[in-house]
Each structure stands twice: as structure tokens, then as C-alpha cells.
């Protein structure tokens, strides 16, 4: 009865984490995108040009790309829950600072620190998933996080534009403060510590962990997959950022209608999350190889290259076809992002936080470039940009095939009783088993053989030396 109750509690906790981790991951990109529609108001309030106020966006994106390299490895030393609490406290405090900022420098400092706080939480969320979720259900949950990152960027400008028009730019940061505080309370209730065996802390190992994600680039497989994942993510963001401005400039849509143009993209991402994660997990379960995580992404990349080619033909000819194809683009990307990320987490075991930081570095680093390219593409030759991206995605599909074929070693199922165990549990069991073997070996070496006490054989005859000593001792006793 007790074991059944404990199992039910574990299932409830996993379901809660499957909802909570995407919510945390959503808040980072949401905070980066939600204040973009109010940039004009900010430039007027602080009496600076729009180019100057846009600098805060570039700096925030740049700092956000590197912040996971600090936060995520820190969770290996201090625990996932503690680091997330620190990040949320920083986020809430910086949101207050943005609300009451009276000059541009103060606002930019608070805004950059706000971005640095929760953009780094994405890597920690991935680490929590790898800590507690079984192998064959990780893909579904990671797909939810990938979708949350995508949807956060989509709904951010829509919500921010409505709030800024109705209540002014400060209301945007009031909204972020309220949402951050609510998710913080949910985290305090439902998130328990998942890192059961933190790494021993020394200043040398801790500060080295900040650059540790970059050391994984020495592995060709890791570097290739991380770079291709970052490129795929940035191309998805290119379509996402381009769409609202594109329908306004080229088709005369209003700002409100431009917000609706993101609905197909969001629906495609949501459906891709439901289907993509399940297919990636099913592929891993069926073929039982690490490379099987990339099989769906390989097929999806070929399909995505065709979709991108069709977008190039439709982008300046039919807004209906363009929006439908953008939804298919979002749907197909989930297979690529989910498969490649889960693959890397399982390839570099025990280093989930650092691997997540490395992927975030490439994703947000390339995204800063793609955002700038979207503005350039809007001004001229929009269709030709998509023709070029079609070739890039087509080449990436061959990379997924090559990597999946290279990592085709058969991995047998774990015993039934250990399927729910986390990486930390298995690591601790291995240490205990090793210690037990060492103790057993030492004990065997220290044991005296039973043959030394065999009473069936006659006692050994005393030597002459021992005979003389015994006779002398007897004479002395007489």
C-alpha cells in the first residue's frame, strides 16, 4: 500500500514538473520580446533615438546567450532548486528596477540583468528533466520546453503591444513582475531538489565550470549537433520575427491583424510538440540506439527544406499560403529541435546543465544574427532569403543522417526496477557497488584460510629449534 502511494506521488510530481519546467523556460524569451512594441514609447520617455534604445535589445540578447554558461553549471554545485530560486529573486528585483527606472542607463542595467536572470534558467530546466524523467518519456517533456521557448517569443509582442497601447510601457514590466512571482510560488510548492549528489565545491572547479560548456566543442559530434541545432533554431526565429512585419509592410495588415498572423505558427508549434516528442521517444524505444533520437529529425529536415522552398515562392505572392506554410515550418522544426537536444543530453551523460548552456549559447547567439537579417530581408528580396535557407536546411539534414548512423550502438533496456531511477541514483549505485567490491576484496585478503585449522590432518612436527627451546623451557620450569 505504501509503495503504491509513493508511486502515485512520483507520477503526480513528474506531471507537475512537466508543466512547471516549460513555464519557467517560457518566461525568459517572453521577457525579451514583450517590451519590443514599446520601444518607441521608451525612446520618447528617455528622450533618445530609437537606435539607442534598441541597443538594450542587442545587449540583452548577447548577455542572455552567455548567462546559461554561468547558471546551468552552478546548479551542479548548489542544486537545481536553489539556483532557480536565486534566478527568480533576481528577475523579480530587476523587474521592480525597470518599472521605477528614471533614466536610460538605469533602465538598460536593470533590463540586462533581468534578461541574464531567466535566460539562464532554460539550461537548468533541461537538467531537471534529465535528472528525474525516464529515458522513454524525456523527449515529450523536452518538446514542451522547446515549444515554450518558441511560444514565449510569439506571444510576447502581442501581449506587450496591447499593454503598452492601453497603459504605457511600465505596465509591460508590471505584467512580467506578476507572472514571474506566480511562477516563483508554483516552483516553491512543486519543485523539490532533483540534484541529489552535488559536485564538491572548490573555487577552481566552480569558475572552470563557467567555461566547461565550451570544452565539449572538442568532441566533433557535440560541436556539429550543437551548431546545427543553433542554426535551425535561428531560422525558426527568423520566420517568427519576419511574419508580423511582413504582413504589415507587404500586405497592409494593421498591428492587431499582424498579431493574428502568428496564430498558424503557434498552432503548428503546439501540434509539433504533441506529435514530435512522442515520435522521438518511440524511435528511441524501438531501435534502442542513441542515434535513433535523430531519425525523425533527419526526415523532418528534408521536409523542412521543401517547406522553406515553397515559402520562398509564396512569401510575396499569397499571404494565405505563406501563413499556412509558416505553421508547417513551426510544426516540422519541433522534430529537429527536440531530437537533437535530447540526443546531446544522453550523449554527454551527467553534464546536462553544461550541455544545455552550450546549446543556448548557439541558439541565442545565432538568433541575434537572424533577427538582424529579418529586418534586412524585409527591405529587399525576401523570397531569395528563403531560397538560400532551403539549401542550408537541406545540408543540415545530411548531418543528422551522418551523426545518427555514427551513433548506432545498441543500448539494451534497463531492468524494470531501475527504469525510473535518475542519473544521480545510478551514479550513486555505481559508487556504492565499487566501494562494496573494494571492501570485499580487502576482506578476502585479510581472511585466514580454513585449511589452517583443518583438524583432520596431523599437527606438524616441531623443528629442532623449537624442540630445544621447548626442552629448555621445561627444564627451567623444573
Image (tube, grey):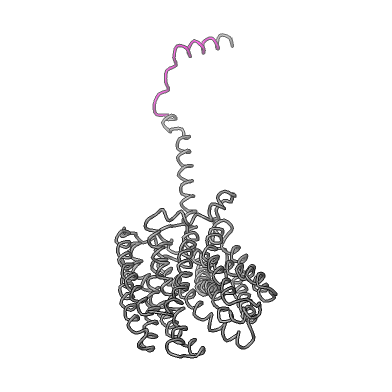
Asked if 61 appears above or below 447 in the picture, the reply is: below
Quadrant of the frame with the C terminus = top right
Mark count: 0
Residue 295, position in %: x, y?
32, 68
Residue 461: say if magenta. yes
Instruction: Give me the residue at 49% from left, 46% from top.
Output: 435
**412 or 243: nearer the eye?**
243
Where does the magenta region start and end?
Answer: 455-473
Instruction: Give me the residue at 66% from left, 80% from top.
Output: 45
**419 or 31: nearer the eye?**
31
Residue 389, position in %: x, y?
35, 73
Residue 469: say if magenta. yes
**399 or 140: nearer the eye?**
399
Instruction: Give me the residue at 48% from left, 50% from top.
Output: 431
**409 or 295: nearer the eye?**
295
- Left or right: residue 188 compared with residue 240: right
Residue 61, position in %: x, y?
53, 69
The part of the image, by quadrant, that contains residue 28 is bottom right
- Left or right: residue 367 compared with residue 48: left
The part of the image, by quadrant, that contains residue 312 is bottom left
Asked if 434 appears above or below 97 in the picture, the reply is: above
Amino acid at each position: 500500500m505504501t509503495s503504491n502511494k509513493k508511486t502515485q506521488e512520483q507520477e503526480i510530481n513528474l506531471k507537475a514538473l512537466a508543466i512547471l519546467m516549460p513555464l519557467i523556460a517560457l518566461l525568459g524569451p517572453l521577457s525579451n520580446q514583450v517590451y519590443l512594441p514599446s520601444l518607441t514609447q521608451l525612446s520618447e520617455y528617455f528622450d533618445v533615438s530609437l537606435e539607442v534604445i534598441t541597443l538594450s535589445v542587442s545587449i540583452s540578447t548577447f548577455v542572455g546567450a552567455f548567462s546559461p554558461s554561468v547558471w546551468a553549471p552552478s546548479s551542479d554545485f548548489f542544486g537545481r532548486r536553489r539556483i532557480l530560486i536565486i534566478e527568480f529573486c533576481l528577475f523579480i528585483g530587476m523587474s521592480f528596477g525597470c518599472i521605477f527606472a528614471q533614466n536610460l542607463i538605469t533602465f538598460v542595467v536593470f533590463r540586462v540583468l533581468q534578461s541574464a536572470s531567466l535566460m539562464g534558467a532554460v539550461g537548468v530546466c533541461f537538467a531537471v528533466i534529465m535528472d528525474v524523467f525516464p529515458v522513454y518519456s524525456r523527449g515529450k517533456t523536452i518538446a514542451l520546453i522547446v515549444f515554450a521557448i518558441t511560444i514565449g517569443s510569439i506571444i510576447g509582442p502581442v501581449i506587450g503591444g496591447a499593454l503598452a497601447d492601453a497603459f504605457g510601457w511600465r505596465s509591460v514590466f508590471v505584467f512580467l513582475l506578476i507572472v514571474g512571482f506566480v511562477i516563483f510560488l508554483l516552483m516553491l510548492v512543486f519543485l523539490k531538489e532533483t540534484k541529489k549528489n552535488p559536485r564538491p565545491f572548490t573555487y577552481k572547479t566552480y569558475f572552470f565550470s563557467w567555461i566547461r560548456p565550451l570544452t565539449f566543442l572538442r568532441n566533433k559530434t557535440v560541436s556539429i549537433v550543437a551548431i546545427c541545432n543553433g542554426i535551425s533554431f535561428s531560422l525558426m526565429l527568423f520566420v517568427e520575427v519576419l511574419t508580423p512585419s511582413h504582413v504589415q509592410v507587404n500586405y497592409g495588415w494593421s498591428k492587431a491583424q499582424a498579431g493574428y498572423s502568428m496564430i498558424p505558427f503557434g498552432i503548428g508549434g503546439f501540434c509539433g510538440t504533441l506529435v514530435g516528442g512522442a515520435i522521438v521517444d518511440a524511435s528511441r524505444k524501438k531501435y534502442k540506439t542513441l542515434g535513433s533520437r535523430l531519425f525523425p529529425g533527419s526526415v523532418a529536415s528534408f521536409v523542412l527544406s521543401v517547406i522553406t522552398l515553397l515559402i520562398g515562392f509564396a512569401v510575396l505572392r499569397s499571404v494565405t499560403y505563406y501563413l499556412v506554410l509558416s505553421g508547417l515550418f513551426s510544426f516540422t522544426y519541433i522534430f529537429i529541435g527536440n531530437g537533437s537536444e535530447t540526443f546531446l543530453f544522453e550523449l554527454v551523460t551527467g553534464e546536462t546543465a553544461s550541455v544545455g548552456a552550450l546549446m543556448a549559447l548557439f541558439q541565442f547567439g545565432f538568433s541575434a544574427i537572424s533577427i538582424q537579417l529579418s529586418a534586412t530581408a524585409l527591405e529587399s528580396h525576401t523570397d531569395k532569403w528563403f531560397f538560400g535557407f532551403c539549401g542550408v536546411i537541406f545540408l543540415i539534414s545530411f548531418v543528422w543522417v551522418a551523426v545518427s548512423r555514427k551513433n548506432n550502438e545498441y543500448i539494451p533496456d534497463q531492468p524494470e526496477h531501475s527504469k525510473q531511477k535518475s542519473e544521480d541514483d545510478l551514479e550513486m549505485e555505481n559508487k556504492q557497488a565499487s566501494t562494496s567490491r573494494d571492501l570485499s576484496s580487502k576482506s578476502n585478503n585479510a581472511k585466514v584460510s580454513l585449511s589452517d585449522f583443518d583438524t583432520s590432518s596431523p599437527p606438524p612436527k616441531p623443528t629442532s629449534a623449537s624442540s630445544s627451546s621447548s626442552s629448555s623451557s621445561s627444564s627451567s620450569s623444573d
